[in-house]
Amino acid sequence: MERLNQTSSVSEFILLGLSSWPEDQKPLFILFLIIYLVTITGNLLIILAIHSDPQLYTPMYFFLSFLSFTDICFTTTIVPRMLVNFLSHKTISYAGCLTQMYFIYALGNTDSWLLVVMAFDRYVAICDLFHYVTIMSHHRCVLLVAFSCSLPHFHSLLHTLLLNRLTFCDSNIIHHFLCDLSPLMKLSCSSTFVNEIVLMTEASAFLVTPFLCITFSYIRILITVLKIPSAAGKHKAFSTCGSHLTVVTLFYGSIFYVYLQPVSTYTVRDHVATIVYTVLSSLLNPFIYSLRNKDLKQGLRKLVGRRKPQAAPP
């Protein structure tokens, strides 16, 4: 609080949300409540199916279970706050706003790096199959997950601390449904030069680097698959990557649209793209990975069948 009083006269922010019309609030509340419940249920089922079926004890599903867990945390950082805003006050404290922003960036970038690790797994499985077991050992998989989960927190902490040094004087209205860097920087009455430089350099590099790693992996995969003589072999190789590619396209397409632009050009139109990578991506991931994956669908059937009450013998 002492730090807050020294640098800012604003103790709370107002999140305008997706709509300012009163008649829109209840329908939006119901819509996002359903999305949230389906997201939690879908990702939880993926985690339980993977950990209850020994056939799914492979690196690919190990990474997928952590992606699902991160999606649960990511969505929980955003949607419950939206639900409160739809039905009651739209205010959020200064500390609460910075805390939400910290976890949005930490968990969102964890998703990003986990997608890199999953791309690397597919690269090794297709391009270096004979050494797959050695390269993707359990110890190495744990290290890759630890790296993916820890590195984004340093990135998020940097931007949170830089934002905390800014002064917010009069306006406290955020034209968004969450606390994000660009809308908050536009409210500052002090210089945001350092923040913008770091945002356009470190943040852009931190965002683009995982995408380039994924792109490189799939270029190598494509080169290898094109050398496979049979059409069936090519189809089998591509089918193991289809779900991951769909998720990568959905996730990075919306993120690049929002963040690879100057702060001054940030508008309300970016809300839709933000919803895609913060809410819809986590909602769709369980469906994308399970609908085209026979092993995972079988694991889900076993899980659901195990939970059904057994009929008493006659």
Image (spheres, rainbow, N blue to C red):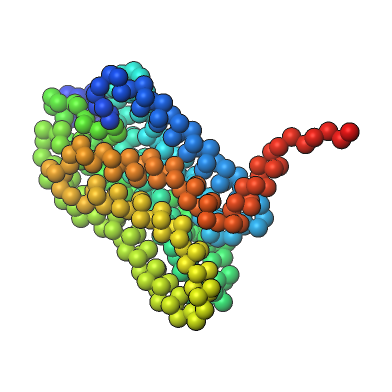
Camera-side residue of 314 and 276: 314
Q: Is residue 155 above or below residue 182?
A: below
Who is closer to the viewer here, 236 or 252? 236
- Above or below 41: residue 143: below
Residue at x 56%, y 77% (from the top left corner): 130
- Please tell me in which quadrant of the rendered image residue 3 appears: top left
Instruction: State left or right for residue 197 relative to residue 126.
Output: left
285 vs 121: above or below: above
If the image is split into quadrants, where does the C terminus sit? top right
Which residue is located at x 71 percent, y 37 percent?
308
Residue at x 65% of width, y 42% of height: 304
Residue 288 coordinates in the image, percent (x, y): 47, 51
Residue 139 vs residue 186, the one in the foreground: 186
Image side of residue 12 versus residue 126, left or right: left
Residue 202, percent across and down?
A: 24, 54
x, y percent for residue 175: 21, 31
Instruction: Give the percent coordinates (x, y) of residue 102.
Output: 33, 40
Q: Is residue 79 visible?
A: yes
Along the horizontal axis of the image, is 290 left or right of 114?
A: right
Left or right: residue 84 compared with residue 63: left
